[in-house]
Image (tube, helix red, strand yellow):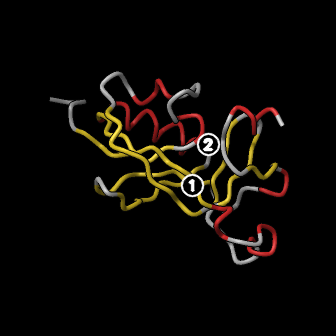
Amino acid sequence: MIGTDKNLVAVYGSLKKGFYNHYMLGEDKELRGKSTVNGVMYLCGTYPRLFHVAKDDNHVFGTLLESQHEVEVYSINDSAYERIRGMEIAARYTEETLLTDWGEAKIYWADTDSFRDSYRWIKAYTPQEIRQ
């Protein structure tokens, strides 16, 4: 049956529980658990863009410990996966595979061609970070 297969996605930012895009994961989503990824996060408007750590990021942050970000790993159906993938690709994110304790999950990284110098660096995507 179409739409019943399960896909794992690792989400951060507006797709996490409590944020405005969480509904896109669908009604039958299942939280598998939480994990961390190594990256640098910048705020673009009201949503985050997570970039891979670059060599020159070390002098900005001092330590890579400041670049650990929590992700929530969900099992979602095919239609929710296609909806999320479409939104992320349209916003110039790239899809990659992240190995988690629950299997391989899709995660979306900001395109390296994005101009992150025009964004504000944030430690985490929280309501407090958004308002600062």
Are circles 2 and 1 on residues that touch, CB within 8 Å? no
Cα–Cα span, label 2 and label 1: 10 Å
Q: Residues within 10 Å of mark 2 (few under 14, many from 20)?
A: few
Left or right of 67 on screen, residue 102: left
The C terminus - image quarter? top right
Residue at screen point 58% across, 25% down: 20
Q: In the image, residue 82 lies at what x, y percent?
A: 39, 37
Residue at screen point 31% across, 39% down: 75
Quadrant of the rendered image containing residue 125: top right
Q: Report which residue position mark 2 lands on.
A: 91
Residue at screen point 54% across, 44% down: 12
Residue at the extreme bottom of the image, as rendered: 55
Camera-nearest residue between 59 and 43:
59
Residue type at mark 2 is Ala
Q: Residues within 10 Å of mark 1 (few under 14, many from 20)?
A: some
Element type where label 2 sits in the image: loop
Q: In the image, residue 44 lies at what x, y percent?
A: 75, 42
Q: Report which residue position mark 1 lands on.
A: 109
Residue type at mark 1 is Trp
Q: In the image, residue 47 lies at what x, y percent?
A: 68, 38
Camera-nearest residue between 32 and 10:
32
